[in-house]
Image (cartoon, rainbow, N blue to C red):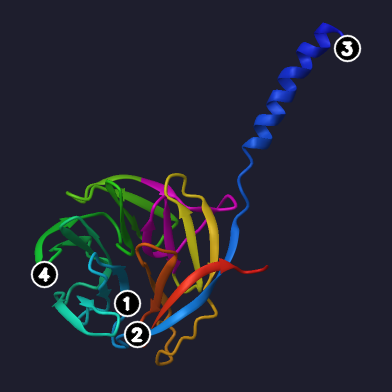
Amino acid sequence: MASPRLCVTLIPLLATSLVACGSAPAPVERLTVEVVDVHPFDETSFTQGLEVDEDGRLLVGTGMRGDSRIYRSTIDGRQSDSHELADEFFGEGLTRHGETVWQLTWQAGVALRRDADTLAEVGRAEYDGEGWGLCSRQDELIMSDGTDQLRRVDPETFAERERFSVTLDGEPVTGLNELECVDGDVYANVFMDADVMRIDAETGEVTAVIDAAGLENNAVPDPNHVLNGIAHIPGGDRFYLSGKRWPDLYEVRFVASGR
């Protein structure tokens, strides 16, 4: 029989071991895309932002100076509410929050505030650095700038609240691009990569890597015509994925890859 002193010594050690085991992070899921359907998409759109609006239509933001715009589109490709950006702006990500749609610009440090019904510009806000991707969750916007950092932004004033780093197995993930907020997760395209990251919006830890390399890129051959654009379809587990000047909009599910 162990002495009372030995029991007192072992109990704290056992408790410490249990806490350490319980704090181990869950393994990162490895997923791939299952194509459910393929829809026509505007092959002239250098897609930088993609989102499903409240009425089921797509909100699309495009890039390139002198060719940037924002518009709505039905799933069969009928466009409306198109607005061109001034030539000095390279359009980037967008998101709707309440009665406002915010649209980023790449290097101008300007966020365009738009009326959610008409998409007409109604104001502007400034931010530091570059603008890449944007999505809306709860009482904040999440913004990417091409680094491993995501920013929490006030949805009314566009004032930055804080930044946090995105990590995969403890290492920073750079090139975070177009974003989509879904519940407690942020989905992110990665610049010049076919992987999509699912990120815990509170901790910044990547919880899943989604391999989208199986999607056929039918764009005119160009190194810039890469996967970019992710939008969750409300009410289910499906997403839309597309790319820069891609003629196709893929309706997909994220499923186990088997690796």
Residue 49: quarter of image: bottom left
Residue 35 falls left or right of residue 17? left
Dot 3: few (<14), some (14–19), or many (≥20) neighbours within 10 Å? few
Which residue is the site of mark 3? 2
The percent position of residue 97, horizontal first and vertical second, equals 22, 56
State whether residue 246 appears in this view.
no
Q: Position of residue 53 (x, y in %)?
A: 25, 67
Q: Label 1: state its secondary structure.
A: strand
- Residue visible at 27% across and 70% down in the picture: 56
Instruction: Give yes or no for contact between labels 3 and 4 (Cβ–Cβ under 8 Å).
Output: no
Task: Name the one closer to the observer, 55 or 108.
Answer: 55
Q: Which residue is mark 4?
A: 118
Q: Do labels 3 and 1 touch, CB within 8 Å?
A: no
Name the spot of residue 160 as percent of width and height, x first: 27, 47
State left or right for residue 149 relative to residue 142: right
Magenta stretch secondary structure, dominant = strand
Residue type, mark 2 in image = Arg
Disc number for residue 245: 2
What segment is highlighted magenta in the picture?
Answer: 163-190
Q: CA distance from mark 1 to mark 4?
A: 20 Å
Question: In the image, what residue type sits under mark 1?
Answer: Thr
- Give whichever of discs 3 and 4 has the lower sequence position: 3
Identify the residue at the far right of this view. Answer: 1
Task: Tell me how far mark 1 sits from mark 2, CA to CA.
Answer: 7 Å
Mark before the other along the chain sequence, 4 or 2:
4
Front tag of 1 and 4: 4
Q: CA distance from mark 2 to mark 3?
A: 73 Å
